[in-house]
Amino acid sequence: MEPIIQLKDVTKEFYGVPALRNVNFDLMPGEVHSLLGENGAGKSTLTKIMAGVYEPSKGSVMLRGEPMSFGKPADALDKGIAMVFQETSLVPSLTVAQNIYLGNEKFFNRLRGIYIAAQQFLQSLNFGVDPTMYVSQLGAAQKQMVEIARAVHHKAKVIIFDEPTATLTPEEKHHFFALVNRLKREGVSIVFISHALEEALAISDRITILRDGQHVITDDAKNFDRDKIIAAMVGRSLSAELYSRDMSRKARPYGHKVLSVQNLSMGKMVRNTSFSVYAGQITGIFGLIGSGRTETAKIISGVVKRDFFHGGEVKFEGKAVRYRVPRPAVKDGIVYVTEDRKIEGFFETKSIAENIYMNLLSSDLNRGIIVSRSEMMDLAKQWTQRLNVKAIDADARVIELSGGNQQKVVIAKALVQKPKLVIFDEPTRGVDVGAIAELHQVINELADAGLAVVVISSYLPEILNLADRILVSRQGRVVEEFSTEDATEAKIMYAAVH
Amino acid sequence: MRLQVVARHLNQEKIVFLLTVALVIAFAALLPNFLDRGNLLSLVRSVAVLGVLGLGMLIVVLGRGIDLSLVAIMAISVAWSMQLIHQGLPVYAALALGLVFAVGIAFFTGILVAYAEIPPLFATLAMSTFVYGFGRAHLITGTDVVYMPQNMGWIVGLGQGKLIGIPMPIVIAALAAFVIFLFLRFTKLGSYVYAIGDNLAASRISGISVRPMLVLQYVLAGVIAFVAGVLTATSVEAMNTRIVNSNMIYDVILVVVLGGVGLSGGRGNVRNVIVGTLLIGVLMNGMTIMDIQYTVQNVIKSLILLLAIVIDSVVNPRDEQTGQQGDI
């Protein structure tokens, strides 16, 4: 059978820095082909070459045996190649239905007509999205669904999914995989990029692994297992330390009570939740999307305000607090490491050093009014070494780093403020396997040093590995607590979904 | 490859600077008196006030705002001061009241933007109209033009004096540029201005008091507008309040944007404003010597702005997908 897309010896350079080196890749009709690798391995670059976003510097791209050269992504779309981007590319000010039909409108574009058609279409995909909603009102998962629906609607022959399941709930993931199987039966070829290896193993026909811009291996999925994939991705076997649970691990003892939350409420997102956090240990909070865990963390750290009436009580170090802005929380020693680093994590026009130094300035640790470049560079050197940030130098801009290194900078920004309580919200989202191990190490060291640490995660192995006690959040409140000894994936999931 | 490397080091600031140099060379070759010391000084002097206002605009724009009320604040606060002197108030008291007026208005604008969360474009546009209307109705009685009182003493020197042969407006503008440079580059609050313009949400989480900082930006801009007003009034011995209805505020935005300060915030510095101001100064001076009509001058000015922006977007594409290395 002839491959639908074939890349031969493709090299792509950015300003002389190679992102891909002599990579071969082919995609058969009607197959699901997973593309795996650490962040910075070249997955996104490779898919963007297929989707016509980039031109390769060297090598050839063949479409059904003919050389292809796309000037712009729209050309690729015309030839039946659609890409579902990590960052959503929907128009926020249009409705769901208008987005799905964007570029395919009839001359007389009757809104009622497309709403009815879109409703039927979304139902056929099992996506519970209202077609008359504006995209700006949707949550991340629903946007992802609309994005997928649009690609399917355009009758694409090749669909490239870049981390499609990161924001979906288990239920929605189930529908998504059913959809992928249906598309496959209809002869659509699918390229699937994911950090969730189990998903890739379950759904793929073939798997290709990239490392440092080079092709490592392509083989049938049935010849892989998790350990083999991880070994190929990182060039060493991380599996033991990262994904399998160390049953001999002892939970850290309880220190003094640092934070106590009583009947905390905020609108519909946080309802009457109560829990405590202790020094010298890691408190894990597990919850699905929409369970109010991020909102709870943001109330504690002053990013959002709790209800004025019947909002409950937050006590930090024995003192009742009600922060209206994050500044007093930072002064008291509470820092929040955001789940969305691009939106609220770092300053993109600033260098690594400036980013880290800015948080020292904004804490009360630096009382001066004059900034000092030498102090900034010393600080940057100290923290990039401690957290092993890989960059050319501390003057590199954060936006140019890989996801893992960006996350390390965001964590360094939080830690320079010498907090007593650190809240990590999804600390390893969009971070490569190698960096995950390093970030976990950093988080463990903080708890060992006596800080109170909260880790919010929707990834069970992460919670099970890190936390000394596990709180499960559901529909805006903490519903159950497990000690690390009794916790199992099944018990936690049961508490989270019921 | 070589070309790419060269292109990467070109930015709007450098392009505008090269354009200025090219214009100077062209005018020097074409116009016999262009390079005279007297002409060069009058060239810089003619844009000194514009440059000072540009510095105020710079601070606000760096924080992802814009201030359309600068010219109104400048005109009304200084005109009112001089009117008070005419009415018999002591000079310093009158000027202090004018400054308090400028700061008060700017403070209120800052409150509107930071606490009432009104977009700066609307807040400052409304304030501009309010200041002009209120000033003309209640503060400045009589004509549009308030002439400079004769008893202003040394303050007249700010507009008409010279320091080692250099007209004082140029010296004051240079001094203001230096002070703002120090503020933005070396102080904590200056760093906050950049941080807020870059990412407001991240600044907030970092523990920066975002709202007071926004108010401070507008207050600083108001102070600078008052200084610019004193320079104007003492140079021409009058303050014509009709200047509010001219397109001067667009010229202020022009020199800021032309120099390469990003309107999206966080990008730019004092150097950008100086470069932008010099280009406008050279252009206007050359065209005036060549006796080009005022309306034609405006056309040329706007074409130059478009040219600079087009060249910049060609050598530094903004498209995230193609222009940045980013997440490979």
Image (cartoon, coloured by chain):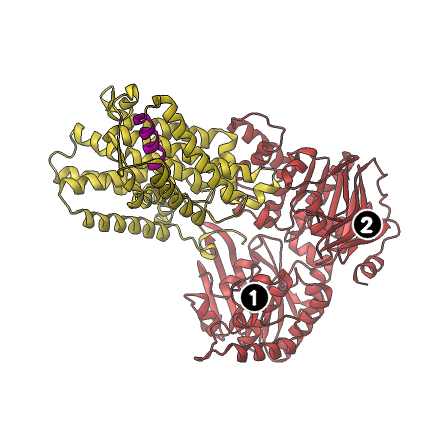
Chain colours: A red, B yellow
The magenta stretch is B75-87
Of all residues, the one furthest to the left in this rendering is B32
In the image, residue A313 sits, relative to residue A85, either above or below, namely above
Percent coordinates x, y for residue B1 in the rendering: 37, 50
Identify the image quadrant of residue A386: top right
Residue located 16% across and 41% down the image: B288
- Secondary structure, mark 1, is loop
Mark 2 highlights which residue?
A: A470
In the image, residue A220 sits, relative to residue B47, either above or below, namely below
Amino acid carrying label 2: it is: Ile
Count of numbered labels shown in the rendering: 2
Of all residues, the one furthest to the right in this rendering is A486
Does the rendering let one see residue A303?
yes
- A38 and B101: which one is in front? B101
Does the rendering let one see residue A390?
no
Q: Tell me the mark number nearer the camera, choosing from 1 and 2.
A: 1
Percent coordinates x, y for residue A249 in the rendering: 84, 45
Mark 1 highlights which residue?
A: A134
In the image, residue A90 sits, relative to residue A386, either above or below, namely below
